[in-house]
Amino acid sequence: MTLQWTAVALFLYGEIAVNLILCIPFISAQRWRLVFSWRIWNWLSPYQNKGFFTMIMVLIVLFLDALREVQKYSGPEPMQDAKVNPNVYDHVHMKLFRAQRNLYISGFSLFLWLIMRRVVTLLNQVAVTLEDNAGLLTQMGSAVKAARQHQEDNLKLKRALLDDEKSMSAKNEQLKLEAEKLAGQLKAAEEAVRKSHTEVEAMKRQAKGLAQEYDRLLSEHHQLQNLQSDQDKKAQ
């Protein structure tokens, strides 16, 4: 195996190991996000896209070269030469095997390179989604607490209003009773005043009758005195 294909094979083994590590179930996406947020990745971030696309181009070139080698050694001309000379037959099959091996190595390397990039992107998205969900759950919890607090406050206000209404209704009943009592007392006072007016009128009429009787008796007394004086004068 030449140096370039040895490097591609090692790169493939590294991709397999990294993808297996990324797919470990007990390592959460949030932990991977912490790993991806290290300073070294921030330092390499300006070169990530360039390196990614450069590696894709290299792997595509190697894949096409391996595909050309496979087509070259699986064509009719090498097979005809191999049929003529048995040593050439083994050599052609060895070349074809190496070309197919290189094709598989470069193809799987390209495929796993794309898969690894996609897995890293999905892990970041899952971590962000989990953080957003945690924030939303916290906000929902605070909103639910606030709603419950408002509900409790509304219940307290309703109870206070009911108590005020009951106290007001009791005070109104008491005021009504006192008003009815005062109305009864006022009616009794009016009856007493009316009776007192009637008695005063009767006493006025009685006093007027007595005055008239007194005047009559006084006039009769004067007349009797005059008659007595006249009789006394005649007797002299």
Image (cartoon, rainbow, N blue to C red):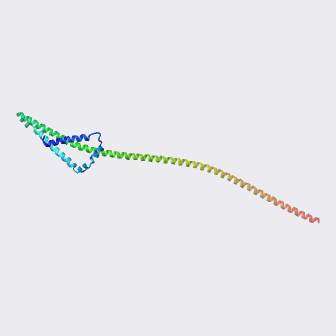
In the rendered image of this protein, does residue 160 appear above or below residue 77? below
* Residue 5 locus on image (x, y percent): 14, 42
Q: Is residue 74 visible from the viewing direction of this image?
A: no
Name the one closer to the observer, 10 or 201. Answer: 10
* Residue 34 locus on image (x, y percent): 29, 46
Q: Determine the residue positioned at 25% across, 41% down.
A: 21
| Left or right: where 111 falls relative to 147 | left
Going by the picture, which residue comes out furthest to the right? Answer: 236
Q: Determine the residue positioned at 37% across, 46% down.
A: 138
* Residue 54 locus on image (x, y percent): 18, 47
Name the one closer to the observer, 217 or 2. Answer: 2
Going by the picture, which residue comes out furthest to the front? Answer: 39
Q: Quadrant of residue 62?
A: top left
| Left or right: where 139 falls relative to 226 | left
Number of marks drawn: 0
| Left or right: where 34 falls relative to 202 | left
| Left or right: where 223 falls relative to 205 | right
Q: Is residue 207 visible from the viewing direction of this image?
A: yes
Q: Determine the residue positioned at 11% across, 40% down.
A: 69
Q: In the rendered view of the protein, which quadrant contains the N terminus?
A: top left
* Residue 85 locus on image (x, y percent): 5, 34
Name the one closer to the observer, 167 or 100. Answer: 100
Q: In the rendered view of the protein, which quadrant contains the C terminus?
A: bottom right
Q: Quadrant of residue 10?
A: top left
